[in-house]
Image (cartoon, rainbow, N blue to C red):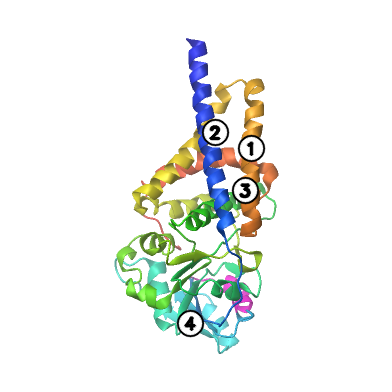
Amino acid sequence: MVLYIHFMILSLWIAVLIIQMGMVGLFAYQFTRYQPFRTLEQEVPISVIIAAHNEEANLKKLIPRLLEQEYSNFEVVVGLDRTIDESIDYLKELNHPRLKWVEVQEIPVNFNEKKYVLSQAIQSSQMEWLVFTDADCFPNTAKWLREMASKMKGKDIVLGYSPYLSNNSFLQSFIQYESFITGFHYLSVALLGKPYMGVGRNMAVRKSFFLAKNGYDLIKGIKGGDDDLFIQQHATATNTTIVLSEQALVYTYPKTTWKDYLRQKLRHLSVGKYYSGPDQLVHFVFNISLTMVWLLLPFLQLEIVLPIILFYLSIKLLGYRFAHIRMGSGFNYILLPLVESIYSILIPVVAIRSKLVKDIKWKN
């Protein structure tokens, strides 16, 4: 009986390993479809859209980087959400012709704060394309807008990648891994022709398309989801493309405590219940199989399964490394067994909690 149980556990473990390696291999293969930067025939007009709530310090880092973009036809529009710091004074001092801002003092009932502020900024914008980022981000190079624009012809949505910086602390290495996995999934699936999400730190939407879809009206009361839920509802294989290169990266700063990170992740995962059934199923299969890989491992004899787990990790490393080359950023691969095992347990727990918590805020 004991041998039978061990055999069943081993069989189940090998099955979930195969699922994991198969999904990673399938996702990694999609990056072979990517067509890199093409010559920009004509600069399309771009409005960079930012929502900020008491972000003076971050705006002082971000705005100069934006104004230095090697692109002639753009403006920067900052939506200020009930600001009580010196953000407005800073923007006034800059007095730059490309820079404008919108002050929001009150948020309508049943309208999410960030979505409302973004809506006001979009209404004030003058350009054909909206390129979104966050106040606590910064473009990796001065060619960011040019790279984004290179993919806009004939499309309504352009998805970019936004990795986290790391100071080599374990928490920030973990966050870097987690953001890589997220980007690895949504970018590869978009290449497969099934775009399901994007990140508001680095994505673009044609303004006329945004307005034709009534902006955030269908999701205005939902906490979060100004980026992924809009993509979930309106992105298709024909109207959406992606941008991959180091020059197109937009970096952001990771949280410095586990408490802040988990609060942020809770907010991100809380909108997952609004994803389509097939998208939820793919996420469920990936996450549950990953969890079982590491939960079942202690019940197996290490000397027997060690070569198998090393083969499994090698396949994953190859897939992630291949995607890393195309995406322009990766993570500390030496930590893969540790960060993946923690991720496999932590994310399902936070996902379950996200379905139970109702009061999730953008900013305090």
Dot 3 or dot 2: first in sequence order is 2
C-alpha gap between disc 3 and disc 2: 16 Å
Depth check, front residue: 123 or 71? 71
Q: Which residues are magenta?
A: 53-66
Question: What secondary structure is marked by label 3?
Answer: helix
Q: Quadrant of the C terminus?
A: bottom left
**Res 313 quadrant in image:** top right
Say which amino acid is labelled 4: Trp
Dot 4 or dot 2: first in sequence order is 2
Lateral position of residue 177 relative to residue 355, left or right: right
Q: Residue at x 44, y 82 (%)?
A: 125
Do the residues under discs 3 and 2 have CB atoms within 8 angstroms?
no
Determine which residue is flagged by label 2: 17
Determine which residue is flagged by label 4: 101
Q: Residue 94: give x, y in percent of width and height.
A: 59, 86
Question: What secondary structure is marked by label 1?
Answer: helix
Total number of numbered discs in the rendering: 4
Dot 1 or dot 2: first in sequence order is 2
Q: Residue at x 56, y 65 (%)?
A: 243
Instruction: State which mark lies toward you, 4 or 1.
Output: 1
Lateral position of residue 280 relative to residue 161, left or right: left
Mark identifier at residue 320: 3
